[in-house]
Image (cartoon, rainbow, N blue to C red):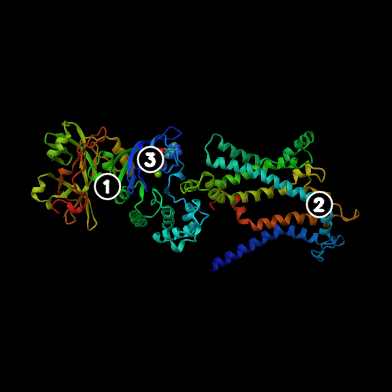
Amino acid sequence: MAQITLDGVTKRYPDGYEAVSDMSLEIQDGEFVILVGPSGCGKSTALRMIAGLEDISDGELRIGGDVVNDKAPKDRDIAMVFQNYALYPHMSVRDNMGFALKLRGLDKAEIDKKVEEAARILDLQQHLDRKPAQLSGGQRQRVAMGRAIVRDPAAFLMDEPLSNLDAKLRVQMRTEVSRIQNDLGTTTVYVTHDQTEAMTLGDRVAVMRAGRLQQVGAPMELYNNPVNLFVAGFIGSPAMNFMPATIEGDTVRLPIGEVPLPDEVRGRLGDSGGKQLIAGIRPESFEDASVVSEDVKRRGATFRARIDVVESMGSELYAHFRVESDQDIESQELRELAEDAGGGEVPSSGEAGQIVARLDPESQVQEGQESELWVDADRLHLFDPDDGRNLTASENAPAATGAGGDERPGA
Amino acid sequence: MQHTNRERAAWSIGILVVLFYALIPVAWIAAISLKTPEQVADRKFYSGFHLDNYEVIFKDDMFIAALINSIGIAAIATLISIVLAAMTAYATSRLNFAGKTVILSGALAVAMFPPISIVGSLFDMWRAVGLYDTWPGLIIPYMTFTLPLAIYTLSAFFREIPWELEQAAQVDGATPFQAFTKVIVPLAAPGVFTAAILVFIFAWNDFIFANTLTSTDNARTVPAALAFFTGASQFEQPIGAIAAAAVVVTVPIIIMVLIFQRRIVAGLTAGAVKG
Ligand SMILES: Nc1ncnc2c1ncn2[C@@H]1O[C@H](COP(=O)(O)OP(=O)(O)O)[C@@H](O)[C@H]1O
Ligand SMILES: [Mg+2]
């Protein structure tokens, strides 16, 4: 087991493309860190550099304190789970899992013991003598995991290990990966483009965009205190709602109306008066005005909106409505997010922006009817459209303003 | 149910017709090879099981020499082609370099080139440089078709190899050499084997080059030697002996094809359908 340190690590491919730029990240012994970001942002490249499969162009990589930049993969004592499993098709499950041990020169009895042990953990005992081609996707995935855990390596590296599974199996294996990592306590770097996986699995999540680390932190910290527009929009499902905003004295003018600014936020904003900003509001920062108590109401604003669609899932209720805006918001990061989400849109001048609000399940809002909603100004994020910076982010760790339903105002 | 039965019957009849059409000449020549010289013209398909002709050819130094030439020349042409082609195919499937497609399409174009158009000039050239009637004199022209064929089939096989496995092996603690020998070679071996069989058969079957570029037992292969058979005595027609020799060169190929038919089909259609 070991600590992994990336110190200004950069990867330039031979064609000149810089896939990872100046990445610094410290992964503690036993920690489970998720690298997350949209496809093509350099996650695999970063992971492959840690594995030794890709040369490091610049910077330093340390595993357990030793600089390993020039060490071959076999001398780094790390195990990797590949996206398409990369099982050896000509070997049985047993030989696949025992391959690394055999290379290390362990005797057969010991290899068998370790393989059986791993097979027991992964529930693969009945399949040990079958070939990978005879296994289902989920079983192959387990074998790939097994190949990693029999070795008891310094670290596990996993590159989208669940992305080839169907949705149900993915959720099941997600729990399994989490359990195994907990039991073994092995340092793990896990790559995924799925923010749900990132939020549910890791001790810490590192968000990447276009080869650069954006923010590293506990899932809830990223959720509550994103440093920029990209992280704010990438983390969370349904995603954060964005709309144009202008500061006018003590209030911020949004397409849904004027919202009072909490003193604390106004202090942090400094001199942004008159400038056009982008406001970000999480779906759960809205509420049906009728269920919010009067004193809570005061820290936000109420507005009326015509509800287009109501999605009720029993424990949750999502209301969709549009906001009209005469302002335009332009941001490279929002465009990227929209591309990644496959056509999510940003409200711009004259166009209607689609907003999702998560309301109390008891809410009586009706499709096609106008309702009175409330927005929590305390949980409003304001971003600088030029560099995407979150102007409202607190410097130190945020108070636990939970995203879960249990802390919802007035509920 | 009835429908599938009828379909099956139609297929069976079709297959029987094709088999009959393809195997009649082979059966015929086999039947002739089992006759004594007197029986050759007796207008019967089968006149008893006589191995006289086989005795004659296996006592004939010319046939033995031709058989050795055939095996040796085809084997060497196959070996050289496969070694060179394996390297070419490895490069074309692993690396991106300028002229990669030119190599593959060039190989195909060369393989398509009709041998008959070059034998005339080769005859003159080989006599001038001393390759006429030697093993290299046949091996070199054979490689004009065995090498492209091998490159083509091996490239198709190598493209299907999941090269990521090499990296998986390295992460598992293998040296690059171990990754190659323990993971890649076992995966590539069946493809190499198939390509070798195909190439060997093509070299073995050649008649045009062998007939034109050889004149003695030095290098004459069996297909070319058949025409030079004399009977057991000068006064007999050598038909029975020729038939026996034809059977001897055909049967190993048929057996090989039957044993490896799945692999050979995979080789001929490699890349077209996924195994
Ligand atoms: N061998 C390579 N040569 C040049 N560019 C590459 C190479 N491999 C990956 N890239 C580029 O680097 C970027 C990051 O790739 P990758 O790390 O695989 O992204 P991710 O895993 O986040 O989807 C992509 O834009 C990709 O096109
Ligand atoms: Mg990737």
**Mark in the foreground, 1 or 3:** 3
Q: In the rendered view, does B42 fall on the left or right side of B206? A: right
Residue at the outermost bottom position:
B2
Q: Position of residue A306 (x, y in %)?
A: 18, 47
Q: Position of residue B71 (x, y in %)?
A: 73, 50
> Pointer 3: what residue?
A62
> Pointer 2: what residue?
B63
Q: Earlier in the sequence, mark 1 or mark 3?
A: 3
Q: CA distance from mark 1 to mark 3?
A: 25 Å
Quarter the C terminus of chain A occupies: bottom left
- What kind of element bears circle 1? helix
Residue type (three-letter) at the residue carrying disc 1: Pro
Which quadrant holds residue B102?
Answer: top right
> Pointer 1: what residue?
A219
Q: Are marks 1 and 3 in contact (CB under 8 Å)?
A: no
Q: Position of residue A62 (x, y in %)?
A: 38, 40
Can you say whether A381 is above or below B21 in the image? Answer: above
Query: Label 3: chain?
Result: A
- Tell me the quadrant of ligand 1: top left
Q: Are marks 1 and 2 in contact (CB under 8 Å)?
A: no
Q: Residue at x 61, y 63 (%)?
A: B10
Can you say whether B172 is above or below B127 in the image? Answer: below
Q: Position of residue A135 (x, y in %)?
A: 46, 59
- What kind of element bears circle 2? helix
Q: Residue at x 39, y 54 (%)?
A: A165
Query: Label 1: chain?
Result: A
Q: CA distance from mark 1 to mark 2?
A: 82 Å
Residue type (three-letter) at the residue carrying disc 2: Phe
Q: In the rendered view, does B183 fall on the left or right side of A49? A: right
**Mark in the foreground, 1 or 2:** 1
Q: Nearer the viewer, residue A223 or A79?
A: A79
